[in-house]
Amino acid sequence: MTKLALSYHHTLFHILTPTSTTHSHLPFHSEFLHRRRHHHHLPILRRSLSVVAKAKTKELILGNPSVTVEKGKYSYDVETLINKLSSLPPRGSIARCLDAFKNKLSLSDFSLVFKEFALRGDWQRSLRLFKYMQRQIWCKPNEHIYSLIIGILGREGLLDKSAEIFDEMAAHSVARTVLSYTAIINAYGRNGQYEVAMELLERMKVDRILPNILTYNTVINACARGGYSWEGLLSLFGEMRHEGVQPDLVTYNTLLSACSNRGLGDEAEMVFRTMNESGVLPDITTYSYLVDTFGKLEKLEKVSELLGEMEAEGNLPEIMSYNVLLDAYAHSGKIKESMVVFRQMQGAGCIPNAGTYSILLSLFGKNGRYDEVRELFLEMKVSNTEPDADTYNILIEVFGEGGYFKEVVTLFHDMVEENVEPNMETYEGLIYSCGKGGLHEDAKRILLHMSEKGLVPSCKAYTGVIESYGQAALYEEALVAFNTMNEVGSMPTIETYNSLIHSFAKGGLYKESEAILSRMSELGVPRNRDSLNGVIEAYRQGGQFEEAIKAYVNMEKVRCDPDEYTLEAVLSVYCFVGLVDESEEQFRQIKELGIQPSVMCYCMMLAVYAKADRWDMANELLNEMHTNRASNIHQVIGQMIKGDFDDAGNWQMVEYVFDKLNSEGCGLGIRFYNTILEALWCLGQKKRAAKVLSEATKRGLYPELYRKNKLIWSVDVHRMWPGGACTATSVWLNDIQELLINGGELPQLATAVVVRGQMERSSITRDFPVSKAVYSLLKDVSSSFCFPGWNKGRIICHKSQLKRIFSKDAEIENIVGLSNSPFPFSGTRTPPPREVKQNSSSDAKEKSFRANTELMTSGV
């Protein structure tokens, strides 16, 4: 075993430029200042705002030479000034800093400096620079500079300072126009003071300064966000139209936003109609607000009607309007309504784009309608709508979740052929699917493709690769991938470690699982419930039952609450040991927690009852499965175990269930088939067990199971439970006999692999559950099968001995009989078939385990 080498319509700042600027020196300042001093109306609001402003005041930004402007963004002089000001200490001299720039910079250059500081939120330097400019003649601020500084302070919630700057304009002989008024209105409006914003709007009119579209939009937005009545908003809307200011897209979207927030369906419809009548074209924001409004009212069909009216009037809506509506229906899971909108847009002559198809593909996929997904994707390609990376990502996710892992890989090849560049999300989705499906070769090729493109795989991608190797029991390769991950600097996550733990756990490699846990502790990676679930499974599969229960008890110490997986794992421990009472108690606990016991739990209980000759209880449990109305899977598996689906026609029902569970990936699949095979073998339904094993291998599970070449034929059952291991070994022996009968050449060595990992070197592996069961079965066939001295995880037989074994029984059809025993009727106590010896334990060992279990679980 490889040694664990686990080393490791607005910019960001509003430039309020009016369509026409009138420089008027109106006597506003004196009156506005007089009202402030005498605490009338506006000053009351201002004083209350000052409290807010103080609370929001930012810490002083210290000079930091490392904060430099991007080279080439501005002229050399502007860049130099910005960098010098950025490096200036809090008490540094602005005047000295600007001496070198006297008469070199224009006010337009200074406006660029203010905008740069606005982007950084550096209001302190902005204000210091502005105060300096006020004292100079060569760079005396104009109204545009005043508007910029008012806006900067307003964005920081410093309304007192904004108002002071606005007040100072008249004293510095700077006339106020719509530009500065809109700036101060915006400052108050964005801070929720819509009453002050409305007062200022009225002052503009008194001072004969006409508001422009930006002014009205600012006031309406502030009022809408501040909770101003709908009638008041309409009044402002009517007022602006009366003043000759035509509402634009921003105006209508602001009103529609208010309708959305307030659930005003009729009003939203009215605004949208007025918008269309005015010739203002809607955008994606418009339709988003409409969909949000009517979606809350559960009247999305109204949006379809409005789109239909536009179509009838010859105003074909843009594709984005249909996509927004489709997306809303998709989020509600309404397939029929989504397709109606899709056909509506096609009927109107609006060609769907990649976004349209992506929405529908995702919708069908989430509802498990994979045939429709394929048809729709084909329709997309036929209609010459080019799929993009997002489309493929959705398909990869859909088919990956659906269990169509090989189809996911096919999609990737199609993507490459169509010259669509995959992104990291694509690669992660691909490798994740390969991990679930155990497609390690494909995962390896995709990783190589990433390397050729110069991409460093993410930790999620590497985790998928590790999982794919683990699903195929390629433990060394999984560790190599893990170490490579550390070498390239892609740090493992808790999911990566858990993937390794569960890979080892399925094969009973508990020593390796312990090593991973130890490394997690060294690196400070906290173990979680998933980690401990894997450890329980590793101990159980490796026959360390007491350690498994200790791990369960320790979950409480690390504050991990057990989940359904945990409870199933503990039940499986009792099942392996054959403890009927403890198994019944665990099964009862699962039910009492309100959890529907899975098919796996039922199969474990059936195996326990069969091993204890409690056929009446087994019958009762099968009847419970058969009458389970909450789950068709329980019904089908229960009937299959009893033989109700043995003929080819009915067996399709079983295949349907197996296909449905395939979507959960190999991880669940191995646990699922192990429990079913255990139940069937213990109940004496051996032929049926062989058929179920065949279904498992057809679906890509147990890829390591059968290997053969001229030298060696092997059956690797180290990841199976005793019942499944005996089934697989019996099929393997019968295949060898069939080969000999048909004139084939026997291999030099026949090997049954029962243990892998570090424990291959230990003789105690003979007592492991799978080892004991398979060895007992093979010894019944011939005493020639033995554990070799060089590997305690193998049971071997040489060619010469094989010839004697199979020539002796040449007349027998199968060297190991695989038939279905008649299922006992309720109340009978039939002894188990002769071949089933794999789970017999000494009474002393069972009593010891039971006693230790009681002591440990008493604290849980």
Image: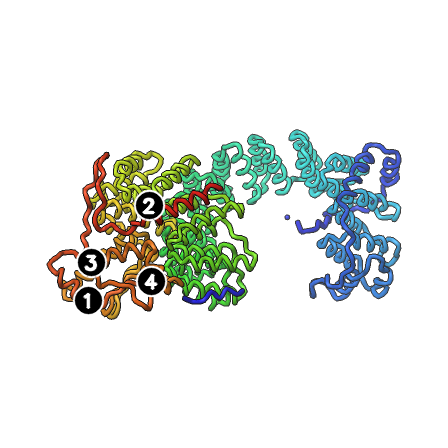
Q: CA distance from mark 3 to mark 4?
A: 19 Å
- The amino acid type, in three-letter code, at marker 4 is Gly
The percent coordinates of residue 254 (x first, y second) are 63, 39
Element carrying mark 3:
helix
Which residue, given by chain and number where applicable, does mark 2 sit on? 578
User: Which numbered disc, 4 or 2, marks the residue that appears first in the sequence?
Assistant: 2
* Mark 3 burial class by Cα count in 10 Å: few <14, some 14-19, many 20+: some
According to the picture, the residue beneath numbered tag 4 turns out to be 793
* Residue lying at 17% horizontally and 66% vertically, measured from the top left: 803
Q: In the image, what residue occupies the spot 36% across and 41% down?
A: 583
- Separation of marks 1 and 4 at Cα, in angstroms: 20 Å
- In the image shown, does 303 or 260 lie closer to the viewer? 260
Report the disc number at residue 320: none
Q: Amino acid at mark 2?
A: Gly
Q: Is residue 118 left or right of residue 135?
A: left
Q: Which residue is label 1 attached to?
A: 801
Which residue is the site of mark 3? 781
| Mark with earlier residue (1, 3) | 3
